[in-house]
Every structure is written in structure tokens, then in C-alpha cells.
Image (cartoon, helix red, strand yellow):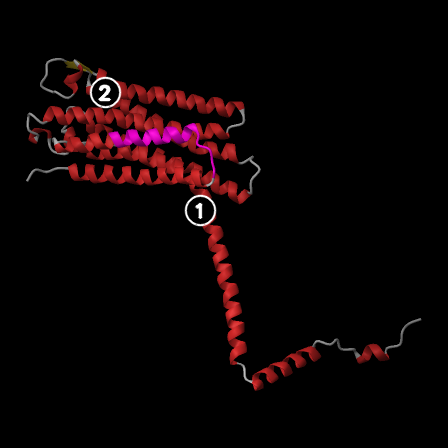
Amino acid sequence: MDESTAPKIVIGLSAITTLSLIFITLRFFCKARYGKKLGWDDYIALISWFILLVYSTLTIVSCKYGVGRHLAEIPPNDQPIALELLYIGRFFGIIAVTTSKTSFAVTLLRLATKRWHRWAIWSIIATLNTVMGLTALFLFVQCTPVYKAWIISASGTCWDSHVTISYSIFAGAYSAAMDFILALFPWCLIWNLQMNKKEKLGLAVAMSLGVLAGITAVVKATYLTGSSRNRDFTFTSADLLVWSGSETAVTLIATSIPFLRLIFREVSRKSQASRKGQADAYRRTHATYQAERDTPFDKEHRMLKQNESSEKSYPRVSMESEITPHST
């Protein structure tokens, strides 16, 4: 039986695509339930998820034609189809990552009040889209003719693989750095808002979860060297393919969590009200039960105890104070 990493690719991409869909759906549900207006960041996030879906679909379909298996074991007729699907899928994967991070940056723009904040965020959006856009473009211009990228036996020329790999590593590192910077911005933007300090802290932490996307980008960058054309990349790129999708999924999840705080707050209020209601009901039930089980002797005994308590509560007059002469 042929060795294959295809199951890892299929299961991994299916899981992260589904999980990110759940969070995107909850994001839109919360906005609809609590009457919040949809913004460009929401639409861009939704577009990013659909692009992620295209990436995952193309990559999973490529497994049917041999991706995940050793290059030498893929039938000659399936190899061009597998590699073409893989290359096109990677193109959509890069676009998905870029749009997901752009969505979060646009969310921050809605909170920015100072001019330098807006300039900084717009600079991140512009440079990130440029750097990542070139990465996507290089997939299709690195070989002449274009199909030489997936038909290895075709005549033509391709760039040295070290050039594209090195630039991809640079782009991945830059993307991770922008994630970390964007994760710090909420602390600058939220801390001066007129909100409860505890609520501000919770919101700032929630909006800083984008740091997880940065960590994912770093992990993905460590697998980039395995995609070199000089290696058995259809087999060794399984982790890279899954982590590429994970970067987009984690970004969408992390940027959707702050919008879920409204439903968390509602659940918390209902839980507190329920506990209070249960405590009140218990006290009423206990009092009723006590009254029903009391005998006349119990009632008389309780009245005597209450009278004794009342007598003990009267203020005592010190005898010394009565006989001590007042100074004149």
C-alpha cells in the first residue's frame, strides 16, 4: 500500500474550514440579534472564508489525483492535474490569508480616532496586501510557459526554487510581524474609551487574540522549505498545506471572538438571574415546609426563644453609673 499524507490534508482542512465557518456564523448571528450594523470588515471576513473554502476544496480534490503521495508514485496522467490543482489552490490560500488579516485591520480602523493610528493601520493594509500579492503572483510567473510549474516534463524555464522559497519565507515572516503589531493596537484604541475598566480589559484581550494568527504564520513559515521543487514536495508539503489553511482559519476565529462578547454577556446575566431565582425559590420553599411541619409545641418554643432574645437585647444600665456622683 502506498504511503500517503492525504488523510492528514483532508481531515485537517475539513476541520479548520468547518470550525471557522461556525465562528463566522456566530459573528453574523450576534450582529443580527443585537441590532449591530454590518461593516466592511464583516463582508471582507465572509469573502475570506469563501476563498478559504475554495482553497480547501481544490487542495482536497488534488489529493484524489496524488497530492499526499510520493511524486514518483503518482501516475503520469494524474500528475499534471494534481500539481495544477495544488498551485491554483495555493494561490487562493494566499489570498484568503491576506483578506482575513485585512478584515481585522478594517475593524481596527472603525475604532481608530487619532490620525497616526489610521495612517499606521492603512500602511499595514497596503504593505501586507502588496507583499502577499507578490507571493501569489510569483506562483504563476516563476515559470515560462506558465504550465511548466505543474507539467514538470514540459520544455521551458523556471526561476531558481531558492528565490521563490526565500521570498515566501520573508512574506510569511512579514505577515506574522503584522499580526503581532495588529494584536497590540486594540490596547491603544480601547484603553481611552468610556467603558468599565474590567470590560475594556476583556475586550482588549479578546481583540488581541490575533497574536495566535501570528504564531500560526511562524509555524507555517518553518514548513516552507519543504515545498522546494527539488524535493518530494507532493508528499512533504502536507503540513504546509494544512497550516496555510489554518492561518486563515485562526485569523477569522480570533477576529470573530470579540463580536461574541454580547452573547456571552447575555448568557452570564441569565445565569446570574437564574441562580438568584433558584435561591429565592429555595428560601420560600424552605419557609413553607418549616411552617407545615411545625407542631404547636415547636411554635411555642420558637416564641419563647424570640422573647428571650428580645429581653437580652434590652440595654443594661450600669450600677456604677447610677451611684457615681456627677461632677459639678
Is residue 187 visible to us here? yes
Residue 49 rendering spot, x and y as whole percentages: 32, 32
Above or below, comparing residue 140 to residue 33 in the picture: above
Determine whether, in the image, residue 312 is placed left or right of residue 233: right
Residue 32, how many percent across, how many down? 43, 38
| Front label number (2 vs 1) | 1
Residue range of the region highlighted in magenta in the rendering: 35-54
Q: Which residue is mark 1?
A: 264
Q: Earlier in the sequence, mark 2 or mark 1?
A: 2
What is the secondary structure assignment of the residue under circle 2? helix
Magenta span: chief secondary structure: helix
Question: Disc 2 and disc 1: Cα gap in Å?
Answer: 43 Å
* 55 within the magenta span: no
The residue at 28%/37% (across/down) is 17
The amino acid marked with disc number 1 is Phe
List the residue tagged with mark 2.
139
